[in-house]
Amino acid sequence: MERTFVMVKPDGVQRRLAGRIIQRFEDKGLRIVGLKMIRMSHKQAEDLYSIHKGKPFYDTLVKFITSSPVVVMAIEGNQAVSVSRKLLGATFGFNAEPGTIRGDFGGSKGLNLIHGSDSPESAQREIPIFFSEGELAKYEHADIGWVYEEPERK
Ligand code: DAT
Ligand code: MG
C-alpha cells in the first residue's frame, strides 16, 4: 500500500478542527498508521519545506508551522498520495472546491489547515522527519475486504 504524510497545521489544531479533519481520511477508507501531536522544531520545519527555501513566503511559513502544535500522520491506502491531495483541495482555501478540507474550512493562502505529500517520493522523504519506522503500526482494518478489491490491497 502506498504511504503518504499528512499534517493538521497549527490553524487546524487551534480552531479545534483536528478531529473533523482526521475523520475525512477515515471516511475515505484510508489507514492511519502513525499519529501524534508535536510542536515542530525549526530543524523539522526547514527539512519539511526545504524545496521552498528562498521563496518570498518561506520565512512566514516556517514561523507559522512552528508557532503552535500540529498533528502529524502517516497514512496508507490505495494511491494514498493522490487520494489525500484530493481530500485536501487546492493549496489556497479561496480556490479550493467545497467538499475538500481546505475548501470547506478556510479562505487563506498560508492558513490552509493541512499538509499532504505531493508525490510518493516526497512522502518517503517526509515521513522519517517525524516518525521512526518502529512508531508506524502494521495492521489491517477488519473490513478491508469491503473497502478495497484484492489487487488494491497490495
Ligand atoms: P501545498 O501545501 O498545496 O503542497 P506548496 O507546497 O506549494 O502547497 O506550498 C507549501 C505551503 O506554503 C502552502 O501550503 C501554503 C504556503 N504557500 C504556498 N504558496 C504561497 C504563497 N504564494 N503565498 C503564501 N503562502 C504560500
Ligand atoms: Mg507542497
Image: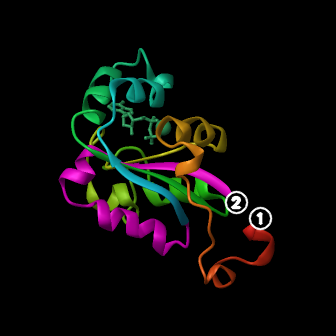
Residue at image coords 47%, 74%:
27
| CA–CA distance in space, label 1 to label 2 | 5 Å
43 vs 63, left or right, is right
Q: Quadrant of the C terminus?
A: bottom right
* x then y, percent, for residue 82: 60, 54
Q: Is residue 29 visible?
A: yes
Residue at the left extreme, as displayed: 15
Q: Secondary structure at mark 1?
A: loop
* x then y, percent, for residue 48: 46, 31
Type of the residue with mark 2: Met
Task: Count the numbered circles shown.
Answer: 2
**In this picture, which residue range is highlighted in magenta?**
1-30
Residue at image coords 32%, 27%:
62
**Crowdedness near tag 1: few (<14), some (14–19) or many (≥20) residues, C-alpha within 10 Å:** few
The mark nearer the N terminus, 1 or 2, is 2
Residue at image coords 47%, 71%:
26
Q: Is residue 99 visible?
A: no
Residue 15 is one of the magenta-drawn residues: yes
As drawn, the label of residue 126 is: none
Q: How is the image coloured?
A: rainbow
Residue of label 1: 154
Q: Are marks 1 and 2 in contact (CB under 8 Å)?
A: yes
Q: Secondary structure at mark 2?
A: loop
Residue 102 is one of the magenta-drawn residues: no
Type of the residue with mark 1: Lys
* x then y, percent, for residue 120: 65, 44
Where residue 49 sits, quadrant-wise, is top left
Q: Nearer the viewer, residue 43 or 10?
A: 43
Residue of label 2: 1
